Image: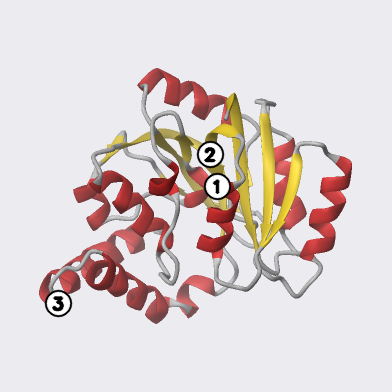
């Protein structure tokens, strides 16, 4: 493990339209001690060619390839298995970091002397045009808070591997809300997540994605509470309603 280095992990699946934009936002970071792991989940477009081109040009960018398509959890976990840095940071293949993201977040993590941090983010459309809608990071989040509201976006997170073990950061397979399940697993094991209320990530939503997947999102939340957290039917239904309402408010 290399001290002070950040391992940035991007799960890639048919991301040719957005991937270069995301990679360039990592290259633009003012904090320069990082490596970037691009992990392809069996893309069928030109994502692999883009990945390989950047690997050939930059010594600190490496590519990895999943043997079969199994979703972003598998890709992120493969990245963790090959991480060399003290810190782990996730960014989705269509999101964007502001240039100071890593520098400010690492300083914040050190100041808090914690294992898990996240930041505020602003919603944008698929062309990265900002909407003015901001999801502000609360100062700290525990397990009970996460049950009510999924306030943490994967692209905003940063973990210190000297304080938290890799198996807690790894994401479960076969779960549609794998990110929320992971944050719950971490906080259920006694950690708190500390929020830096600065907009350091641009969360890009594809046109129609949210409205088109409302039913899928609700099913995913049900699975999270009932199948992963093993809550009763009544308790699971309660948290699905509470969490869904929080998501609606966050997008207003």
Q: Tell me if label 3 and label 1 are in contact, CB under 8 Å.
A: no
The residue beneath circle 2 is: 88
- Dots 2, 1 in contact, CB < 8 A: yes
Question: Is residue 31 positioned above or below 189 on the image?
Answer: above
User: Which is more toward the observer, 223 or 3?
Assistant: 3
Q: How many marks overall?
A: 3
Q: Where does the N terminus fall, quadrant-wise?
A: top right
Other-residue count near label 2 (Cα within 10 Å), few / some / many at <14 / 14–19 / ≥20: many
Instruction: State which quadrant residue 172 falls in.
Output: bottom left
Q: Nearer the viewer, mark 2 or mark 1?
A: 1
For marks 2 and 3, the one nearer the N-term is 2
Q: Which residue is mark 1?
A: 80
Q: Please tell me how crowded label 1 is: few (under 14), some (14-19), or many (20+) other residues with Cα within 10 Å.
A: many
Residue 60 lies in quadrant: top right
> What residue sits 66% from the left and 69% below the top?
67
Is residue 124 among the parts visible in the rendering? Answer: no
Mark 2 and mark 1 lie on one chain; the one further toward the N terminus is: 1
Of helix, strand and loop, which one carries label 3? helix
Residue extending furthest toward the top: 111
Residue positioned 54% across, 62% down in the render: 74
Compute the Cα span from label 2 to label 1: 8 Å
Q: What's the residue at 45%, 52% (across, down)?
A: 170
Q: Position of residue 145 (x, y in %)?
A: 23, 48
- What residue is at 70 percent from the left and 64 percent from the top? 15
Disc on res. 233? 3
Measured in 3D between alpha carbons, the distance from the residue under mark 2 to the one under mark 3, in whole angstroms, is: 35 Å
Does 100 appear above or below 179? above
**Between marks 3 and 1, how big is the CA–CA gap?**
34 Å
């Amino acid at each position: 493990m290399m001290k002070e280095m950040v391992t940035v992990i991007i799960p890639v699946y048919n991301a040719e339209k957005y991937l270069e934009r995301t990679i360039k936002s990592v290259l633009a970071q003012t904090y320069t001690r990082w490596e970037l792991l691009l992990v392809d989940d069996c893309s069928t477009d030109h994502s692999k060619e883009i990945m390989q081109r950047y690997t050939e040009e930059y010594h600190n960018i490496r590519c990895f390839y999943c043997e079969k398509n199994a979703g972003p959890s598998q890709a992120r976990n493969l990245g963790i298995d090959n991480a060399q840095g003290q810190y782990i940071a996730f960014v989705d293949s269509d999101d964007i970091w502001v240039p100071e993201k890593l520098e400010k977040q690492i300083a914040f993590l050190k100041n808090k002397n914690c294992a898990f941090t996240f930041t505020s983010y602003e919603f944008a459309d698929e062309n990265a045009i900002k909407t003015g809608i901001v999801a502000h990071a609360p100062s700290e989040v525990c397990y009970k808070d996460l049950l009510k509201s999924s306030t943490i976006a994967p692209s905003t997170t940063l973990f210190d591997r000297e304080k938290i073990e890799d198996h807690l950061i790894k994401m479960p397979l076969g779960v549609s809300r794998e990110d929320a399940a992971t944050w719950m697993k971490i906080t259920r094991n006694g950690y708190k997540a500390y929020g830096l209320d600065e907009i350091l990530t641009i969360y890009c939503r594809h046109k129609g994605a949210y409205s088109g997947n409302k039913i899928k999102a609700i099913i995913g939340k049900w699975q999270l509470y009932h199948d992963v957290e093993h809550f009763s039917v009544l308790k699971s239904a309660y948290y699905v309603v509470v969490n869904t309402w929080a998501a609606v408010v966050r997008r207003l």
